[in-house]
Amino acid sequence: MELDTAHPLRSSPAAAAVLSACSNGVLLVDAGISTFPILDVNPAFCALTGRTPEQLIGSSAILLGDATFSAALAAVAGGEASASLLLRVGGAGGSAPWCQWTISAVPGADQGQAPRQLVCIADNVNELHEQQALLAHLSTHDVLTGLANRSLFNERLQLAMGRARQRGDGLAVLCLALDGFNLVNESLGYVAGDQLLISVAMRIQACMRPQDSLSRHGGNEFVLVLGEVDSTAQVQAVCEHIVRVIGAPFPVIGQSLHAGCSIGIARYPHDADDGVTLLRYADMALSHARSLGGNQLQFFAPEMNQRTAERAQMEAALRIALIEGQLQLQYQPVADLQHGTICALEALVRWQHPVMGLIPAGRFIPLAEAAGLTTALGYWSLRRAVEDMASWRAAGLAPVRVAINISPKQFRDTALPQVVADVLAQSGVEPSQLSLEITETALMQDPVASDATLAQLKALGIGLTLDDFGTGYSSLNHLKRFPLDLVKIDCGLTGNIVTGTDDAALVKTIISMAHHLGIEVAAEGVETEAQCDFLRRNMCDQIQGYFLAKPCDREEVAAMLAARHALPSHLLRIQKQARTLLLVDDEQNIVSALKRLLRRDGYQILSANSGQEGLAVLAANAVDVIVSDQRMPGMIGADFLRAAKGLYPDTIRIMLSGYTELQSVTDAVNEGAIFKFLTKPWDDEQLRTHIAEAFRLKEIADDNERLNLQLRTANHELAAANRRMEDLLRQKQQQITRDEISLNVARELLQFVPLAVIGLDDDGMVAFVNAAAERMFRQNGAILGNEAEIVLPELFPDGLAPSGSHQVDINGRCYQVVAHPMGANSQSRGSLITISICEETE
């Protein structure tokens, strides 16, 4: 069949040129034949299809599309005005681009005549179509893992519940969260955290069946729907398998990471019959699993819902408490171990509920954190503490530093430095009397931002304390990096320093490294004299705990400060104790005789009738020298002195006995438990001499320890002074840098001022010349760096340096010369001279 190629598109060279230049694909189709043969194509259409005109012309246009395209061609050929549809060019499949097709009829020669040709225009919208498809995918899928998001999860959950109803079985919703995920982000960065999440998603997917569904709801939380569930045991088996799989090491950025997970489970229809409630119950179960320490499975139980409701009620009540003044501050004193006096107070927030009474902080602080109230709570504590400090000052009490705890969220609040500055300014309290306690975890969430915030706070003149040291990173680098004044050892370490060698060694190390950097150390949770004495002997600066005082209200604090409450003198770091002697003998007449003999030597004498009593006396008193019998009921003297050496190695131990069996005594001497062995009956003067010698040895040891403490104290004070000097030098350097920038800006501005400006130093040398002055005195040669009187004689008509204002003649014109002395409002010196044309007078 021969095609009629006479058509309007080729009616002229101009039309052909337009067709060829068109960027859209154009196809001319014969409308009079049912197969719609192609009459002509333009180059753009050939490029879209990857075919030549010879391959296309004469073929059926129907082959370029699907049934929809064929129907659109037939409709326009049958009289429709036009048709529009989205279709891949060249067919429905393959890699051909998506195009927006527009099909129009070419009118016949006579009005109303059926069209002879159809014009099909293909607009390439492939990129737009792909973007729309991507947006559609992102609206239902997680960007990072490619899993379903919350929206698609809800749809899948509804479908799964419908299938469960039809089959008559059940399903389970699992909320899964990684334990300690934030630590990965903080220590290795967010790239590592993202890689870990992707790996976790892949491992969970490997545990799933075709009827299960997995989604990510943000953060480190995943939600699974387990379909076709028949029993609790089946669900538990799946969960335990997931926990084991996730517990295996993950290779992340060249490291091997271990990640545990917690899972909360709710079952349909056992726990709820709607999706919203199922998800809420699974989330409650997850919270309970995490509260148990993580790496736990927890099925939902009705009492969880009750606890959640109670928690919500408590949260609402806490918000009311902030408004209605139900909160109060108590203060726990901190004592200085060098002087024994109260040197600081830690402000502790308490909640006096009108119905439930006093609610401990451990119960409502986690509520405040979950509800996002810690920042408001922190600012309330700050303002109330500063008010109390002002009231103590008004009562004539000596100023004492008060420490306020700053939560991680409050520390990240950019308004914190300004709020602190405003509160101090309004109250008149000296900044040095306020300290902020910040945890190491809060500082390390964003170290760069922490540097900036701490610098602003430090500039206010307040103290900065690192709280709970020893429980987190406990890094020497962090102590060096941040401008800290005090480190607080956590009470978890303090409680075991007397009985636990590891904690004792760790506390000694913390004190030593902090002092090396010029930072003071305080120990929290000190409850016994033995703990206080250990800290005193190991150079701790301050103690806080029930041994000194429990938290008390502001009236009790005022009374304590007025009474100058202090530690006992024998617990101060540097001291000279009274000479104390302990006599241990089961024969009372021997003890009495020894007391009569030795009282004249001025000793403080204590006594005990057995080894057990002797150890009790040692626990309650500081003893220098021990004199013990050997034969005593319950515990022989050698064993008693051996125990005394282990517990109180600084004591000097003497055995005085009439018992001549020497083996146990010899062993004790060889072990160092006995300093001397004396026999009964004794020679009075010889016994007095030996005891006096023991006290001299003890005093020498005490003097050595005292000198050592004094030297270490001096070294610590020197390190602290060096740290303060480094801070000052750093601030000065920053100020110099700012001044240099300001000077350069000023020089730059003066260069563009049309007024002639010349700067002189104190010696009358030209230190600055702007562009206008250089043009004015171009004929004078080099000016900068020379003596002004010589190179600028025009300004010195009387041979005197200009001062004030006067007029001069320069090149036949009158100029006003004004000298501005420098230094009135800055540290600048010399003078600035401006030269302007005299104003004309009538």
Image (cartoon, rainbow, N blue to C red):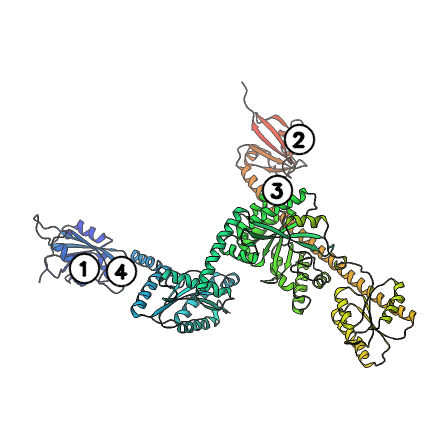
Query: Where is mark 4, residue-wise?
Result: 97
- Residue type at tag 1: Phe
Q: Are marks 2 and 3 in contact (CB under 8 Å)?
A: no
Query: Where is mark 3, residue-wise?
Result: 427
SS category of the residue bearing label 2:
loop
User: How far across and down, in percent of the image, does residue 808 sit?
Assistant: 61, 26
Query: Few, some or many C-alpha atoms within 10 Å of disc 2 (few <14, some 14-19, many ≥20)?
Result: few
| In this rendering, the label closer to the viewer, 2 or 4 | 4
Query: Where is mark 1, residue-wise?
Result: 69
Q: Which mark is residue 801?
A: 2
SS category of the residue bearing label 4:
loop
* Nearest the eye: 65 or 763: 65
Query: Few, some or many C-alpha atoms within 10 Å of disc 1 (few <14, some 14-19, many ≥20)?
Result: many
What's the CA distance linking mark 3 and mark 1? 81 Å
Return the disc, 3 or 4, that comes first in the chain's sequence.
Answer: 4
| In this rendering, the label closer to the viewer, 2 or 1 | 1
- Residue type at tag 4: Pro
User: How far across and down, in percent of the image, does residue 147 sit?
Assistant: 38, 64
What's the CA distance linking mark 2 and mark 4? 85 Å
Q: Among all residues in the image, which is located at the extreme front? A: 355
What's the CA distance linking mark 3 and mark 4? 72 Å
